[in-house]
Image (spheres, grey):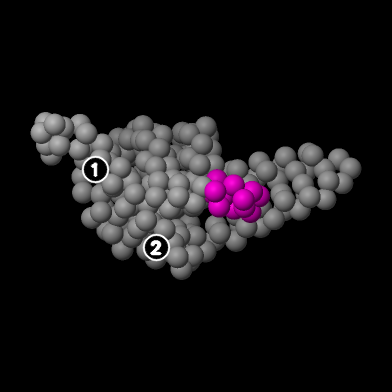
């Protein structure tokens, strides 16, 4: 019993991991309350997830990511949020009308939404690793999605799934309130960071570390 409760036991390590997941999830949601800060909160959460995977202090990484990436992440969110809302509305309208031959248009709108969701998720993960100008951030994130489509789509869909469920299946969303509050976003951030760990590691290794070096490598990978 004493060995199980010792600080370096596997049981305590699991408890610490669960506690970190819950606390970071709550911190993320609190930072999302003003809505305009969702982009900065995502950047901070991804920074914390990277720190957790490297056994570094995750809370310090969260607040450092929130502070250092606040302005550019918020500006990126101002661009991406209206675009996401517009594409959701278009897809929903086409599906609800169900006019003759609506399916091809619906599938095209859905594809566009998935692509933008993937880029939107990638932007905040990219900025948690590299500092670059806003236009370059959006461009590099798009190249990253093109170079690694499957990983990017999975990350994007998981990141924005609660938003889609809120609009399309509100009852089920409410039933999962406890999951959203304590587990989901922090867990998905960990999964997304893990999914993109190898591509980003390869990029960091090949690129010179400068903005232009990163872009050149992404353009080459996307060909």
Name the spot of residue 127 as percent of width and height, x first: 38, 52
Whether residue 117 is visible, yes or no, is no
Considering every residue shown, the one lying at the far bottom of the view is 34
Sequence-wise, which precedes: disc 1 or disc 2?
Answer: 1
Q: Nearer the viewer, residue 114 or 188?
A: 188
Name the spot of residue 33 as percent of width and height, x first: 45, 65
| Residue in the image at 89% along x and 42% along y | 100
Name the spot of residue 147 as percent of width and height, x first: 49, 35
Q: Residue at label 1?
A: 16
Q: Secondary structure at mark 2?
A: helix
State which region is magenta.
161-175
Magenta: main secondary structure equals helix
- Looking at the image, is 146 positioned above or below residue 180? above
Q: Residue at label 2?
A: 31
Considering every residue shown, the one lying at the far front of the view is 1
Q: Nearer the viewer, residue 38 or 112?
A: 38
> Would you say 73 lies left or right of 162 here?
left
């Amino acid at each position: 019993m004493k060995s199980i409760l010792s600080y370096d036991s596997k049981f305590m390590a699991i408890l610490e991991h669960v506690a970190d997941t819950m606390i970071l999830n709550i911190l993320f949601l609190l930072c999302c309350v003003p809505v305009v800060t969702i982009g900065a909160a995502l950047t901070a959460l991804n920074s914390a997830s990277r720190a957790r995977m490297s056994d570094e202090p995750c809370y310090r990484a969260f607040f450092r990511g929130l502070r250092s990436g606040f302005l550019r992440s918020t500006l990126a969110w101002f661009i991406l949020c209206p675009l996401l809302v517009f594409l959701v509305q278009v897809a929903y309208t086409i599906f609800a009308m169900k006019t003759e031959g609506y399916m091809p248009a619906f599938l095209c709108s859905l594809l566009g939404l998935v692509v933008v969701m993937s880029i939107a998720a990638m932007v905040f993960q990219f900025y948690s690793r590299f500092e670059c100008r806003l236009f370059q951030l959006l461009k590099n994130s798009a190249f990253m999605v093109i170079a690694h489509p499957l990983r990017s789509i999975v990350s994007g869909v998981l990141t924005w799934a609660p938003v889609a469920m809120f609009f399309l299946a509100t009852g089920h969303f409410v039933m999962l309130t406890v999951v959203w509050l304590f587990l989901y976003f922090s867990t998905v951030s960990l999964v997304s960071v893990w999914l993109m760990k190898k591509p980003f590691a390869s990029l960091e290794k090949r690129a010179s570390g400068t903005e232009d070096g990163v872009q050149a490598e992404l353009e080459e990978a996307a060909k």
